[in-house]
């Protein structure tokens, strides 16, 4: 894998995201809506919904970024770029944007709520971004259009909101780790919540990114197998 090519993909994805001014505004505003909507409730609810807002916005940004550049990937592949370079470069750009969005919200939580375990909330935000980015990439690699992916994301976030975090089914959801870490940070529970949240989030991030990379590589191999030149030989 070539670091220069990987950085080129990261830079290309960053430019594409920065060029979409409306998307950047929504990336910063949507989590605020989630947070403000539960601000009058228990402190833990506002933090949990802030994390869900981050999850939804970063996943959606990753989905649209993956779909927008899908037509460019075969040409990059033919130019010598590896599928791993395309996936890692895109992930790097999404993580950079996601962490940039987290910074002001960590400040808002610190000033507004004065939590005792602010570092745990920071870890929850970072882990949420680390799970949301490859989740959006995976959906962008497997769904045919952005609308289907956005609907799936809405269903996932909705299920995360209504599912009892203590239920076994909740652990199958990608952002269960955020609720565990938020519970540890706000409700001052034991370190087992922190440990479970970190392990679940890290595991989900690795599995989702691996799946997204494999789907992207399989799609590009299929495109190469049906390139115009090969199709012409097959017809002959």
Image (cartoon, helix red, strand yellow):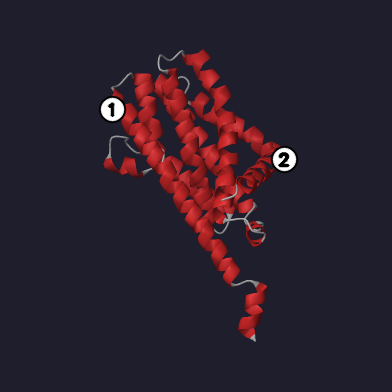
| Tally of numbered discs | 2
Asked if the residue under mark 2 is in contact with the one under mark 1, i.e. CB atoms within 8 Å, the reply is no
Q: Position of residue 85 (x, y in %)?
A: 58, 50
Tell me the residue that label 2 is attached to. 19
Q: Secondary structure at mark 2?
A: helix
Q: Using the image, determine if residue 99 lies above or below residue 172.
A: above
Image point (58%, 30%), residue name: 101
Tell me the residue that label 1 is attached to. 192
Image point (33%, 18%), residue name: 188
**For residue 96, which numbered disc appears in the image?**
none
Question: Which residue is outermost to the bottom?
Answer: 236
**In the picture, residue 228 is in which quadrant?**
bottom right
Residue 184 falls left or right of residue 104: left
Q: Quadrant of the C terminus?
A: bottom right
Q: Position of residue 19 (x, y in %)?
A: 72, 40
Residue 4 falls left or right of residue 143: right
Q: Residues within 10 Å of mark 2 (few under 14, many from 20)?
A: few
Q: Position of residue 47 (x, y in %)?
A: 45, 25
Residue 69 in view: yes
Q: Using the image, determine if residue 138 lies above or below residue 100.
A: below
Q: Secondary structure at mark 1?
A: helix
**In this view of the protein, which residue sits in the foreground, 222 or 118?**
222
**In this view of the protein, which residue sits in the foreground, 108 or 204?**
204
Q: Residues within 10 Å of mark 1 (few under 14, many from 20)?
A: few
């Amino acid at each position: 894998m070539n670091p220069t090519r990987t950085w080129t993909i990261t830079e290309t994805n960053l430019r594409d995201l920065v060029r979409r001014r409306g998307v950047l505004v929504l990336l910063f505003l949507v989590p605020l809506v989630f947070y403000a909507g539960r601000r009058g409730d228990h402190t833990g609810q506002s933090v949990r919904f802030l994390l869900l807002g981050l999850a939804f916005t970063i996943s959606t940004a990753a989905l649209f970024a993956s779909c927008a550049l899908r037509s460019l990937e075969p040409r990059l592949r033919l130019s010598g770029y590896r599928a791993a370079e395309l996936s890692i470069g895109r992930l790097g750009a999404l993580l950079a944007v996601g962490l940039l969005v987290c910074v002001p919200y960590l400040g808002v939580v610190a000033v507004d709520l004065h939590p005792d375990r602010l570092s745990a909330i920071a870890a929850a935000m970072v882990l949420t971004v680390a799970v949301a980015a490859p989740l959006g990439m995976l959906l962008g690699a497997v769904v045919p259009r952005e609308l289907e992916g956005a609907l799936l994301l809405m269903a996932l976030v909705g299920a995360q909101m209504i599912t009892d975090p203590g239920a076994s089914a909740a652990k199958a959801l990608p952002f269960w780790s955020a609720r565990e870490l938020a519970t540890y940070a706000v409700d001052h529970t034991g370190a087992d919540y922190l440990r479970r949240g970190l392990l679940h989030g890290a595991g989900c991030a690795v599995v989702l990114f691996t799946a997204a990379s494999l789907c992207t590589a399989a799609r590009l191999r299929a495109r190469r197998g049906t390139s115009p030149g090969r199709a012409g030989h097959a017809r002959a």
